[in-house]
Image (cartoon, helix red, strand yellow):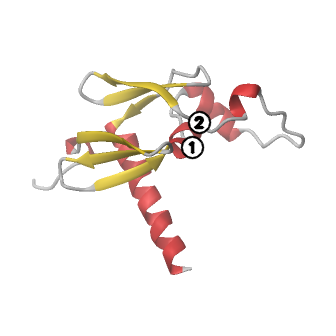
Amino acid sequence: MSGTSANAYFPISLKVEGNDRLVIEWNDAVRHEYTWATLRKNCPCAGCRSEREKPPPLMPIIKLEEAQPPRPRSIEPVGRYAYQIHWIDGHDSGIYTFEVLRQLGEQSAEDAAKRQLD
């Protein structure tokens, strides 16, 4: 059986570009750009997933830490399968597996291509 599974993809380079994005170069020469806002909005932790499933509040109250654009305090590797992002808002329980990052990157690239067609 041939082919490359999603688990075979791994980052060979992570770079911060400007103040608002992370660039990942993958082992298959694919390059994805992720805004910090996209990564924070798609945090894979159980708490954030649960919050995304709730209906939006009618009158949202923004916390002080949410009033500024999301930015990482640090990014640390987790074994050989993921990264943990420590956000300036104090959140740090999301483990971004390579598979999750790859899917987010592909979705971001598709969204960018659609915007160019509009």
Element type at mark 1: helix
Front in this rendered view, residue 58 or 31:
31
- Left or right: where 54 falls relative to 23: right
Q: Residue furthest bottom?
A: 117
Q: Residue at x 67, y 35 (%)?
A: 68
Mark number, residue 70: 2
Q: Residue furthest right?
A: 59
| Residue 28 position in % (x across, y down) | 18, 53
Front in this rendered view, residue 65 or 113:
65
Mark number, residue 37: 1
Q: Residues within 10 Å of mark 1 (few under 14, many from 20)?
A: some
Query: Mark 2–mark 1 contact, CB under 8 Å?
Result: yes
- Left or right: where 80 falls relative to 101: left
| Residue 45 position in % (x across, y down) | 53, 28
Mark 1: which amino acid? Ala
Front in this rendered view, residue 117 or 7:
117
- Separation of disc 2 and disc 1 at Cα? 6 Å
Give above or below for 115 relative to 31: below
| Residue 71 position in % (x across, y down) | 54, 34
Mark number, residue 60: none
Quadrant where the image shows the C terminus? bottom right
Give above or below for 25 relative to 14: below
Q: Residue at x 63, y 39 (%)?
A: 69
Mark 2: which amino acid? Pro
Q: Residue at x 68, y 40 (%)?
A: 53
| Residue 16 position in % (x across, y down) | 38, 40
| Number of marks in the rendered image | 2
